[in-house]
Amino acid sequence: MIALLRYQAALLAGSHRWLPPVIFYAAFLAIGVQSGGPILDAFGWAAGGLLPVAVWLTRVCVTNEPPAARACAAAAAGPGRVHFSCVLTATGAGLLLALLGMAVVLLMSDPRSADHQVHVPVLPAAGAGLLAALACVLMGTAIGALCNWPVLRSPGWGIPTGLTAALLLLVLGASPANAAVTGLVTGSAHGTISTPWLPLAATVLIAAAATAVACGLSSRRT
């Protein structure tokens, strides 16, 4: 698996298809993370932007390989393992962006509540922000795994389906990603930190199930 991950990471880096989602996320941070802004609001914004970015990165990784190269890798290591390495590579790239977003928030934001009256402890806030970001990355990975090959056979449906699902899961109250982001923003009003353990646990299960479905289908449809 380590060799497969290195191979997929090299493919991703060499293709330069990572540039558009990275540029999108950088612009997203530039718009929403303002110097001196409340730290919990900024963490919520940075985490929310990772959901569509993770969907995008997952699509890039699972469609990055030429068909002939994919067939050779699948013959050598098994189609399920190859597809799993693609999804893990996308998740890893999303986590790197999450760390980048966290660093930007820590450098630019004010560790106070939304009204700048209550001090917010930086380390617990950073921990809650990182967990919320991880929840959004995992939810985006799940969407990307289910909205591309081999679950959706038609490539044309992947982009509109994935973007629509990402938007809905950001705004719907029942979504774990929405709960993680909302907890940060709501806590910012009073300067309280809500650590999103439950939303994170839910996204771990969802991402694991979605990845298992996609890897299982890849074995049948390769």
Image (cartoon, rainbow, N blue to C red):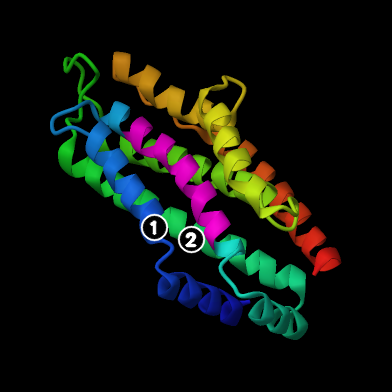
Cα distance, mark 2 to mark 1?
A: 6 Å
x then y, percent, for residue 210: 71, 48
Q: Is residue 45 magenta?
A: yes
What residue is pinned by disc 2? Answer: 92
Q: Which residues are magenta?
A: 43-60
* Amino acid of disc 1: Leu
Which class describes the residues within 10 Å of circle 1: few (<14), some (14-19), or many (20+)?
few
Per the rendering, the mark at residue 85 is: none
Left/right of residue 108 with respect to residue 72 in the rendered view: left
- Out of 99 and 191, give the one closest to the viewer: 99
Which residue is painted at 40% across and 43% down in the image?
Answer: 130
Which class describes the residues within 10 Å of circle 2: few (<14), some (14-19), or many (20+)?
some
x then y, percent, for residue 113: 24, 20
SS class of the residue under badge 1?
helix
Q: Is residue 63 magenta?
A: no
SS class of the residue under badge 2?
helix
- Out of 161 and 137, give the one closest to the viewer: 161
* Amino acid of disc 2: Gly
Q: Quadrant of the C terminus?
A: bottom right
Give the overall secondary structure of the magenta segment.
Answer: helix
